[in-house]
Structures are given as C-alpha cells and as structure tokens.
Amino acid sequence: MTSVPQPPADVTRHLRPVRMRAADDERHPTWLELFFDLCFVAAVAALASGLHHHPDARGVLTFAGLFIPVWWAWMGYTWYASAFDNDDIVFRVCWFVAMLLIIALASQSASAADGDGVGFALAYGLLQALLAALFLRARRRESTARAFATRYAAGDLLGAVVWLASALVPPPLQYVLWATGMGILMATPPFAVLAYRGKAFNAAHIAERYGLFTLIVLGESVVAVAAGLGGGGLTRPQVITAVLGFGVAACLWWVYFGSVRWSSLTRDSLLRSFTWGYGHLLVFAGVAAAAVGVHLAADAAGGLAELDATGRWILAGGVIAFLTALIAIHYVTVMRWDGLSTGRAAAVASLVALAALGGGLGPPVFSCVVFGVLFALAVVETLRLGTSPAAEASPQIGG
C-alpha cells in the first residue's frame, strides 16, 4: 500500500507571541531553567578551580573579576524568563544557544585568568547580544512594557558591543572595557524599570531561582570535601578538616534557607528589590570562595600545602561575604536592625579576628572554629525564628 504524503508541519503553531507575564502568575522553575543552571555548574567550577590553583591576592582578584560577569549572565536570563518566558520554539532554541555560550565562557576562564581574554570576551559579548535580541523580540508584541523591553535591549546591546570590542585590544585596556561593559549591563535593570510602573517578575519564581543557584555554589563545597578526601594515604587531620568543611557548607545552607525571605520583592520599593537581587552576588561568590577555602584547608591538613594568610582569608572571607550580604538582604526585608542582624554582625567580627590572628592554628583547628561560629549562629537563629520560613520559597519544578 502506498503511503499518503503528509503535509509539512506548521512551524508557526510552535511560535507564540511574547507577552509580559503577570506578576501574580504563579509559576515555578521549569525543566529548561534547571538544564540552563547546569551549564553554570561548569562555569562556577572552573572559577573555583582557578582560585584553588592560585590562592594568592592575584588569584582572589581574578576570581572576583570573572565571577561577576558569570553571575550577571545568570541574572540576565533568569529575570528575562520571569518576565517573558513563553516556552515556544524560539525561546527554547535561544536558551540552548545561550547554554553553549556559557560552556564556552567556562572553557575560556582559565585563559582569561592567564591574560588571554579574547575567547572569554567573545563568548560573553555574544551571550549579552542574544539576550538583547530576546528583549527586542518581546518589544515587538508587548505594548504595555515596550519601553521597558526597549531600554533593556539597548543596555544589553551596548554592553555586548563593549565586550566584543574588548576582544580587539590587549590588557590592561581590555580589562578597562570589561569593567565599562559590566557597568553598563548592571545599570540597565534600574534604567529599564523606571520605564515600567508594574512588576516585571514573579517574586516567588525569582526567590526559587536564587535558591537553586545557591545550591549550585553549595555544591562546590561538596566537591571540595570529596577532593579533600581523595587519593590514598589520608591522614586524621585531613579527614577531620574535610568533615568540618562539610559542616561549614551545611551551616551555610541552614542559615540561608532558614531565614532568607523574599517578601521585600513583593513590595513597591526599587531599593529593596535591587538590594535583594544584587546583594546575592556576595552570597554566591562567598559560598564559592568558602568552598575553595575548605579545599585549601584539607590540602594543608594532608601536608600538600600550607594554610597561609591568603588561604585563611579565602575560607573565612567567603563566609564573611555571605553573612554581610544576608545582613543587607534581611535589613531591606524587615527595615530595622534586629537580633538576627546583630548575631550575624558578631559572627562577621569573630571571623575577621580569626582570619587576621589565626596564623598559629592548624587547618583542623581553624576549620573547627569557622564551623563553630556558623553552627552557633544557625542554632541561635533557629531558636529565635521558632519555625523555619524556608517553605516561603520551596522549589516546585516544572510550573
């Protein structure tokens, strides 16, 4: 029997108009967003590896300088999806292309750290240009938020041009252009929001996305513990240090998911929303740096290296950055200085003193004190809060 030819599939039925999603449109992270996040696992791991192999002042500056654009790439696509995710074929293909560019970004981070930033700049510039194209697509059909989408597209496109241009010049001018491009990109959201009176995001969705990225960087701590226990000939100090490192990661998880609320995102206050959103840079970078510090401490405990002043500051400093960010985020949430803020400030002061004066402490003892400070803080906060508010942002996937 001869088969009857079928008409070609109508591709247009897989295309949907891009509309601003209502702020109260209940939704949760999608499977595509989780797939997207996996690419950032590679990027964060590459940056952490660079800091681990160069635990000095230059390595810290390089880690911070490269972490900011990686974090911002995640930010840009996450906030776009919260506003304009229509899950059609164009949206999916664009996100798959973005994932490839993120992988390229991760692969070029080591070269960028060594002074060859051409590949990193090209990948990042194309990543931002793609985001600008997505906003231009939203602008075509979206009437109520056209000015918002236009400003976002203009800022992202200008930032992309600066990043692409930086590939044509050598350092240090290249780094000047990187800083200029990041300044443009990070100033774009406030500039765009001023053109839109409503909310361009779903607060619960954003909180869940941030929580998931927090888990990504916490995963680096798990990797650090496994690396610290890797190989043969484990010593008791090495095992103790690695176990305490996992305890540090567990306490960071406990403090973050036990107390960070997102109610400030639901209020009509740009200061609160942007402090909450931008403040997470120190949360993510701090946790990732602390994971590297755990790895360095485990190496030192095994006799593979020395936990010098820089190593102590990487471990304690990562936790300090994390807690400092939580102080700011909590303050804009409750708009007062309360017991939680006081406890975190006391923990920060203790860790500063430890990093500055703990040169005579061995890696197990130093790690034990860091863990002790965090454990005490987690217990106090749990008792103070009574019941955990973490359910406020518990992830429900696929919505």
Image (cartoon, grey):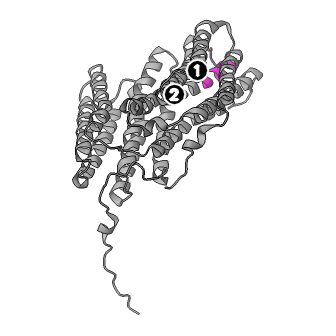
Q: Nearer the viewer, residue 270 or 116?
A: 270
**Mark 2 or mark 1: which comes first in sequence?**
2
Q: Which residue is mark 1?
A: 344
Q: Main secondary structure of the magenta part?
A: helix
SS at mark 2?
Answer: helix
Q: Position of residue 277 (x, y in %)?
A: 43, 33
Question: Residue farthest to the right?
Answer: 236
Amino acid on which the number 1 mark rests in the picture: Arg
Q: Which mark is residue 330?
A: 2
SS at mark 1?
Answer: helix
Q: Nearer the viewer, residue 96 or 339?
A: 339
Amino acid on which the number 2 mark rests in the picture: His
Q: Is residue 230 above or below residue 362?
A: below
Residue under the point 53% across and 39% down: 211
Report how far apart the C-alphas of labels 2 and 1 lie in the structure.
Answer: 10 Å
> How many residues crowd around disc 2 within 10 Å: few (fewer than 14), some, or many (20 or more)?
many
Residue 67 quadrant:
top left
Left or right of 300? Residue 154 is: left
Tell me, yes or no, whether the two marked residues, 2 and 1, touch with CB atoms within 8 Å.
yes
Residue 195 quadrant:
top left
Q: Position of residue 52 (x, y in %)?
A: 54, 24
Residue under the point 26% across and 21% down: 173
Residue under the point 35% across and 87% down: 4
Give the total of numbered labels. 2
Q: Nearer the viewer, residue 48 or 16?
A: 16
Q: Is residue 86 above or below residue 278?
A: below
In the image, the segment drawn in magenta is 294-305
Q: Is residue 298 magenta?
A: yes
Q: Nearer the viewer, mark 2 or mark 1?
A: 2
Q: Which mark is residue 215?
A: none
Residue 16 quadrant:
bottom left
